[in-house]
Image (tube, helix red, strand yellow):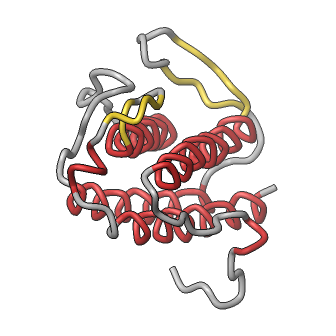
Amino acid sequence: MREHFILFSRYNLWANRTLYGALTALPPEEIARDRRGFFGSILGTLNHLLVGDRLWLARMAGEDSGWFTSLDQILFADFDTLRREREISDRKILDLVPALPVDGDLTYRDSRGRPRQAPWPVVLGHLFNHQTHHRGQVHGMLSHAGYAPPPLDLIYFPRNDFQP
């Protein structure tokens, strides 16, 4: 299981870099435009992903998440700053995943402060599935904006050539 999650942490970094690279073709107003997604815009959806990842990273590392206010919180309204912070979080995921347990449960508090417990493989699977789900939404929004979205399927991930 550990190698599986390490692969997904590497893929996650690559997929986010690839998607953010494609998004640089859009003017800021197009990134912020409401596209009727669950989190409104491309910017809103990307912020949601970062909020979710930072929240799970804090839970997994036993750190404080007092910064969290809501799942639709806009951490960074500026795309370049958001992109830089995404890279930082993806590198934290890459560094943290190999050291995490793959057996037992994680005990944490959910976004409403309720105590929860979940098996580590489910937590890690959720982390990467959540990324893929919302990247897919952004992929669709990019297409609807008239830009060609990049292929992000795992099968296209250059496993041997990719340098994190």
Residue 7 horizontal/vertical position (percent): 70, 67
User: At which x and y percent is residue 69?
Assistant: 27, 22
Residue placed furthest toward the front: 146
Question: Outermost residue toward the right?
Answer: 1
The residue at the point 43 percent across, 60 percent down is 92
Vertical arrangement, residue 39 with respect to residue 75, above or below: above
| Vertical position of residue 162 compared to residue 114: above or below | below
Q: Which quadrant holds the N terminus?
A: bottom right
Q: Where is residue 44, by image quadrant?
A: top left
Tally of marks? 0
Determine the image quadrant of residue 82.
Answer: bottom left
Q: Nearer the viewer, residue 157 or 104?
A: 157
Q: Is residue 8 above or below residue 71?
A: below
Q: Is residue 102 left or right of residue 10?
A: right
Q: State the residue at coordinates (25%, 27%).
A: 66
71 horizontally vs 59: left or right: left
Residue at the (36%, 38%) spot, across then down:
41
Which quadrant of the figure has residue 9? bottom right
Residue furthest toward the bottom? 161
Is 146 drawn above or below residue 120 in the view shown? below
Side of 126 relative to 72 (left or right): right
Q: Which residue sits at x=22%, y=63%?
A: 80
Q: Nearer the viewer, residue 63 or 158?
A: 158
Q: Nearer the viewer, residue 40 or 129?
A: 40
Viewer-side residue, 62 vs 14: 14
